Structures are given as structure tokens and as C-alpha cells.
Image: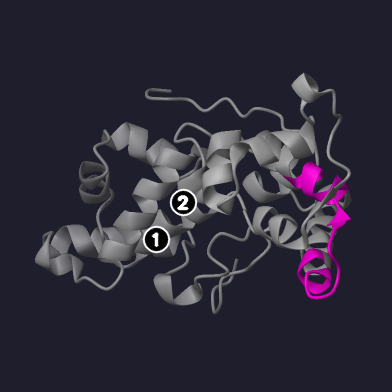
Amino acid sequence: MPGAVIVMNERPHGYARAKLDRCPCYTCRWAVAQYYEARERAILYGTWRPFVDAAPVRAHIRNLQACGMGLRRIAAEAHVDRKRLQAIITGRPERGTGPQPRVRPSTAAAILNVEPRLNLLGPSTPIDGTGTRRRLRALVAAGWPEQELARRLDRTPGNFSALIRRTHVTVRTALAVRSLYDELWQEDPLQHATGYAVNRARKRAVRLHWAPVMAWDDDTLDDPAARPRGVAA
Ligand SMILES: [Zn+2]
């Protein structure tokens, strides 16, 4: 197969796999539930406790690292000093201290607020390709010829037809397809392609049961468990 073939790195089941690979298994869902619980607790305790347990915060920093985020990135996003993150995960060996046992609730909440959103991940990080596939398919269903979409994504037609089927994509590709989709979903393809090509794209999407734009909401597009509205799957 031409072009970049994505080697899916097998992330262990847990938060990172749930968030990046959208794994629906029990372990992954439990890890995410633990995270939300810790975040809520930090926010709640913040109003009346001077300190909270650092363990869930430490676990979350590790989770973000497992997603490929570096400490520098996490610190910038949480608006917390990097040394403070270091103190939470490893302590300050130069001062002879181990991992910090407790943290200020506001620090905990700030760190627990950081999630591995696409724009915070490294561009070559592999992630679940569901949203990417659905966006491209919905554009074809709207009448955008695959050749035109491939051109706009700087891809060869062969590379593009592999992409529209791929289970995993890089963050870079996912972001490029997102912005293409945001740009085109309300546009009229007839302004950019011949009636023949538009018609052919629509027919192809119908034949392959590719769901149209109307079948998705912003919050269902990327969710592998979500089914398209009004389309026999
Ligand atoms: Zn899992």
C-alpha cells in the first residue's frame, strides 16, 4: 500500500487507550471513570480543604504522558510550573524528597483539567480513525468527488482511498481532515466540480452506505459506538 502505513502501537488498556484508540473495554472505561471522579473530587474539595491526595493527580500526569504528552506541554496547558509536576511524580531527589503526597486542590484541579485533545498531541501520534473516516465519507455523500478531496489534502487518489478505510490515523491527518470538513460541509460541491463528478460521488456513497453530514452531531462523529441517524448501517 502506498503512502504512510500506520503502525498501531499497542497501548495498554487504560486512560490513554480509551482516549486515543476509543477502546470501549471495561478496563478503559473504568480508567476514564476514575479520572472524572478524581477531577470532580478535586474541584469539590477545593472549596474547603487546604490539601488533597496527590495520587490521582500523579496517575493523571502518567496517563497524559502515556498519551505522548511531555511534561512541558502538560505544565503549559495546566498553567502549573514544570518543577511542580516533577515534584508530584518523582519528588525532588536533590532535596532528598520523594513524590509529593498532597497538593493544593487548585493545583490538582488545574492538572486534572488537562485532557489529551488533538491539538495538544504530537502530530505523528496514532489515534482512532473513526471520525476521520466519517468526515470524508460524509463529504463524498454530499457530492465531493474523492479526487477533489484528495487534492485538497495533498494526497494521491490511491493514498486517499486507503485513508477513507483506515482504522487508525495520525493526529496530523485527523486535524487536516477536520479542518477540511469544517470548511466544506456547508459548501456546494457543484461550485468546485462537474455535475457528473458530483453525481457520481453521491451515488458511490449511497451504494457503500456512507452516512451523510446530517446523520452526525459534533459529539457523535468521533464516537465509534455512535450510529448514524436515519441510515441503515
Ligand atoms: Zn481497552
Q: Is residue 135 magenta?
A: no
Location of residue 162 with respect to 25 vertically, above or below: above
**How far across and down, in percent of the image, does residue 203 sit?**
33, 63
Q: Is residue 216 left or right of residue 114?
A: left
Q: Is residue 118 left or right of residue 81?
A: left
- Residue at the extreme top of the image, as rendered: 94
Location of residue 69 with respect to 42 vertically, above or below: above
Distance in Å between CA atoms under marks 1 and 2: 16 Å
Instruction: Specify the quadrant that holds the C terminus.
Output: bottom right
In the picture, residue 223 is in which quadrant? bottom right
Color theme of the render: one colour
* Label 2 crowd bin: few (<14), some (14–19), many (20+), radius 10 Å: many
Q: How many marks?
A: 2
Q: Residue at x 36, y 64 (%)?
A: 141
Taking the image as four quarters, which one is ligand 1 found in?
Answer: top right
In the picture, residue 225 is in which quadrant? bottom right
Q: Residue at x 81, y 73 (%)?
A: 44
Location of residue 187 with respect to 119 vertically, above or below: below
Q: Is residue 50 magenta?
A: yes
Q: Please, what is the three-letter code of the amino acid marked with disc 1?
A: Ala
Q: Is residue 66 left or right of residue 99?
A: left
Q: Residue at x 27, y 35 (%)?
A: 155
Query: Which residue range is magenta in the image?
Result: 42-60
Q: Which mark is residue 84?
A: none
Disc 1: which residue: 205
Q: Please, what is the three-letter code of the amino acid marked with disc 2?
A: Thr
Disc 2: which residue: 132
Between 182 and 115, the one nearer to me in the picture: 115
**How far across and down, in percent of the image, does residue 93 sit?**
79, 22
Describe the element under mark 1 as helix, strand or loop.
helix
Q: Point out the tag, 1 or 2, that comes first from the N-terminus.
A: 2
